[in-house]
Image: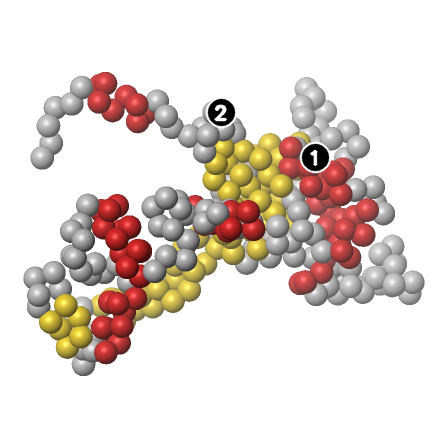
Amino acid sequence: MVRPRRISDFKPTFTNLAQTSHYQVFFAGLPLMLRQHLRVRGLDSRFITETSGLLCSGALLPGSRLATADIVGNHVGVSEKMAHTRLFTQIQLEFYVDNKYKTLKFLEHWMEFIANGATSRDNRQSNKDYYFRMEYPDTYKCDETKIIKFDRDYNEELEYKFVGLFPLDLTSTPVKYEQSQVLRATATFSFDRYLMGKYDSFSVARGRSGNRLPELVPQNATQAEFEAALNRDTGGKPNEPLIGSGTGSEASKILKGTQTTLDGTIFLNA
């Protein structure tokens, strides 16, 4: 029921909102051949892992969507949608360009390496009849790039780790005879998937991987401990069935052909 509320009731909620300007990007885990290609062009590991991320002036936290299929016939006159694939959208990163142009070199030579498989003494890039051949994905995809979102108090942070990331598009960078501004470069990155939350060995060992709160559900918890934790979190009764929670016991009953609702009704699966 809607009721009148004082401003002081919801003021703590709206005075503790996350801000857009506190984040950091980390490029890491580049394959050896790619690192060597960049190193001989003046892009050392310190620039790649530290400076390039600091120069990232704008980023997008990744998103995804579910591809669905239309299912007709399970119920008379009803068309249902069921998910079959999770699709990940591309992200766009904007960078300040330093006065040694290392930012542009980093992006340009990374993309150059991807299409560099045919380069040889007889097929130089400066040749008129030069042709391209792509490298194998394992040689140019990066599995350790991260975007970490935090706030001014540093109490909470959100980590996104990208798997199979590589630059897909480097936008043309405009320059012109007008009032000088900071030069910026914008690149679009593709990736296979991302992980939300920390998955390093330290977090896994302490049961904090994937934004897990170990005080709510202990790591390697038994089915009984997991259901008890869910009951504590939802305020349910200790012996109340968790219909729709996806528990192991419920899945077992479904596979056996039966399912019991909260009111005790038993359904037999055809």
Residue type highlighted by circle 1: Thr
Q: Quadrant of residue 1?
A: top left
Q: Which residue is drawn at 75% across and 39% down?
A: 46
Mark 2 Cα-neighbour bin, 10 Å: few <14, some 14–19, many ≥20: few
Instruction: Return the x and y of residue 129 as percentages of the image width and height.
Output: 84, 63
Identify the residue at image location x=65%, y=44%: 27
Q: Is residue 262 left or right of residue 7?
A: left
Give the mark, 1 or 2, whose residue is nearer the N terminus: 1
Identity of the amino acid at label 2?
A: Arg
Residue 131 drawn at (x, y percent): 79, 64
Calculate the distance from the C-alpha at mark 1 to the C-alpha at mark 2.
21 Å
Query: Can you say which quadrant of the picture contains the C terminus?
Result: bottom left
Q: For the point 61% across and 50% down, which residue is it?
A: 144
Is residue 173 at all visible to an observer of this figure? no
Q: Above or below — where is 148 with respect to 212?
A: above
Residue 267: which quarter of the image? bottom left
Q: Is residue 178 above or below residue 228?
A: above
Q: Which of 174 and 45 is in front in this view?
A: 45
Look at mark 1 in the image and give the residue it sits on: 51
How far across and how far down the image is residue 111, in percent?
71, 52
Q: Report which residue position mark 2 lands on.
A: 152
Q: Is residue 218 visible?
A: yes
Tell me the SS state at disc 2: loop
Residue 258 relative to residue 143: left or right: left
What is the secondary structure assignment of the residue under circle 1?
Answer: helix
Check the image and report above or below for 102 versus 62: above
Q: In this view, does 89 lie to the left or right of 238?
A: right
Left or right relative to 227: residue 24: right
Image coordinates for residue 9, horizontal then vertical, percent: 22, 22
